[in-house]
Amino acid sequence: GFGARLHYERGDGELTYQRAEARLTARANRGGLMYAARLDLGVTSPDAPPQQLFELGRQQNLPGYDYKAFAGDQAAVLRGAVAWMTPWMRAPVLITPRIWLPPVAPTLSLGLQSGWTRASNATALATVTALGSTESDHARTSASLTLRVLGGAVGVGIARTLDRPGPTRWFLEFGQRY
């Protein structure tokens, strides 16, 4: 299926800003395989408070990079994945006659993530620098391999940057990504 989301928010007073986000998603299941893609775009006021900037990194859609490695008042992230649900343990787990857990259902997922941030003026760049981040300058890309369980709710994986040399990073995540 396909999905879309548009979001706009505005703050007035001492913390004045405007922020807009758009998301497009696509997902298809074919037997034990799942294919997914997601595009997120965002822009906020260049003089917005730091918490309104977009940050990318290990826990923010680029698992091959450091935590909050990149930030800006403009951002884009494109992610894609192919996942294979193994044929094992697909039935829910019975705890009591009325309490069930999701099936263990081990799933192996290969993902590609690419993200970009930009500070559109000196004010935005000063805020990015104060956060200890930097602009991405160009699209930054990483690849990940994840083993997910409990209907995709918990995953452990490895990730590596593709656009520059870097270490292989382990990560743990909760919640579905696609």
Image (cartoon, helix red, strand yellow):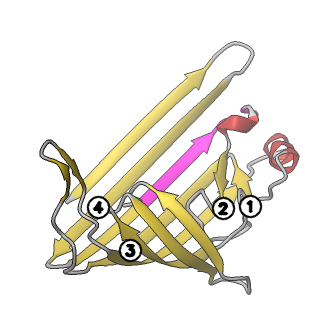
Q: Which percent across, then down, holds residue 99?
A: 20, 44
Between marks 1 and 4, how big is the CA–CA gap? Answer: 30 Å
Task: Check residue 1 for magenta coloring.
Answer: no
Q: Residue at x 52, y 77 (%)?
A: 144
Residue flagged by tag 4: what amino acid is it?
A: Gly
Position of 126 compared to 112: left or right? right
Instruction: Read off the residue under disc 2.
Output: 57
Magenta highlight: main SS:
strand
Q: Which residues are magenta?
A: 39-48
Q: Residue furthest top?
A: 13
Q: Residue at x 62, y 84 (%)?
A: 162
Q: Which percent across, then down, holds residue 109?
A: 39, 77
Q: Which percent across, then down, holds residue 36?
A: 32, 69
What SS does tag 3 mark? strand
Between marks 2 and 1, how big is the CA–CA gap? Answer: 5 Å
Residue flagged by tag 2: what amino acid is it?
A: Gly
Instruction: Read off the residue under disc 3.
Output: 81
Q: Earlier in the sequence, mark 2 or mark 1?
A: 2
Instruction: Read off the residue under disc 1.
Output: 69
Mark 4: few, some, or many residues within 10 Å (few <14, many ≥20)?
some
Q: Which mark is residue 34?
A: none
Q: Residue furthest front?
A: 96
Are the residues flagged by discs 2 and 1 in contact, CB closer than 8 Å? Answer: yes
Give the camera-side residue of 84 and 103: 103
Q: Earlier in the sequence, mark 1 or mark 4?
A: 1
Q: Which mark is residue 151?
A: 4
Q: Residue furthest bottom?
A: 165
Are the residues flagged by discs 4 and 3 in contact, CB closer than 8 Å? Answer: no
Q: Earlier in the sequence, mark 3 or mark 2?
A: 2
Between marks 1 and 3, how big is the CA–CA gap? Answer: 22 Å
What SS does tag 1 mark? loop
Between marks 3 and 2, how big is the CA–CA gap? Answer: 18 Å
